[in-house]
Image (cartoon, grey):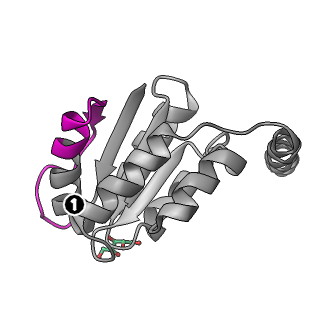
């Protein structure tokens, strides 16, 4: 599994600790920044990871900011991305089983590295259940299609 990871300054320390723990668990990852605790803008990092997951270059993404929320908002702007902010183990499991989420976001100011490690391990190892949930994912794709149509119509009017 190819995992793309990024953080802003609010998630930097959590990312630093999580990268080591993921490596110890045998996962391979690529880190797309940031590289220090200097203040940066989370949309820049969320976009890079979301585009790489949406294109198929990476299978999953993990984004860390202060709360996980800003990263999640940005990542979900990219068609094909199902990003979720998760800070508990039940949601980590069920969002994979039901939503086939492909980006996990967490907050460095919300949870510690032990909790993030457990959540990431569950999220990375739980499979999508398919079945009735497949139909719901198709409906999400159709929403994306209708948004795209709206954008095209708006573009043709300008
Ligand atoms: C940065 O201060 C903070 O706003 C950011 O890390 C994140 O929490 C945004 O949602």
- Bounds of the magenta segment: 20-39
Quick one: which residue is furthest to the bottom in this view?
110
Q: Is residue 97 left or right of residue 126?
A: right
How many numbered callouts? 1
Query: How far across and how far down the image is residue 8, in percent?
Result: 27, 60
On the rendering, which quadrant does ligand 1 occupy?
bottom left
Q: Where is the N terminus found, in terms of image quarters?
A: top left
Nearer the observer, 62 or 146 = 62
Q: Residues within 10 Å of mark 1 (few under 14, many from 20)?
A: many
When asked about the image quadrant of residue 14, the answer is bottom left
Query: Is 72 contained in the magenta span?
Result: no
Indicate left or right for 36 with 32 as reference: left
- Measured as percent of width and height from the top left, residue 57 is found at 47, 23
Give the percent coordinates (x, y) of residue 82.
62, 48
* Dot 1 beta carbon under 8 Å from ligand 1: no
Does dot 1 land on a helix, a strand or a loop?
A: helix
Residue 120 seen in the current view: yes
30 in the magenta segment: yes
The quarter holding residue 49 reads top left
Q: Residue at x 50, y 37 (%)?
A: 51
**Left or right: where 48 falls relative to 36:** right
Residue 73 shows in the view: no
Image point 88% across, 44% down: which residue?
132
- Residue drawn where x is 46% and y is 32% of the image: 52
Q: Is residue 64 left or right of residue 136?
A: left
Which residue shows up at 51% across the image and 34% down it? Answer: 53
Depth check: give the residue in front, 134 or 52: 134
Q: According to the image, label 1 marks what residue?
A: 14
x and y, in percent, of residue 97 in the image: 66, 46
């Amino acid at each position: 599994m190819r995992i793309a990871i990024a953080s802003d300054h609010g998630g930097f320390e959590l990312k630093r600790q999580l990268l080591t723990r993921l490596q110890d668990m045998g996962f391979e990852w690529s880190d797309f920044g940031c590289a220090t605790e200097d203040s940066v803008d989370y949309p820049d990092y969320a976009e890079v990871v979301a585009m790489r997951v949406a294109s198929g270059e990476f299978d999953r993404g993990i984004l860390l900011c202060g709360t996980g929320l800003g990263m999640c908002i940005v990542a979900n702007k990219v068609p094909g991305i199902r990003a979720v902010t998760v800070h508990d183990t039940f949601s980590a499991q069920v969002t994979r089983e039901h939503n086939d989420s492909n980006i996990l976001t967490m907050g460095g100011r919300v949870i510690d590295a032990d909790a993030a490690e457990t959540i990431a391990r569950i999220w990375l190892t739980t499979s999508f259940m398919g079945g009735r949930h497949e139909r719901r994912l198709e409906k999400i794709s159709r929403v994306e299609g209708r948004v795209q149509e709206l954008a095209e119509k708006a573009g043709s009017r300008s």
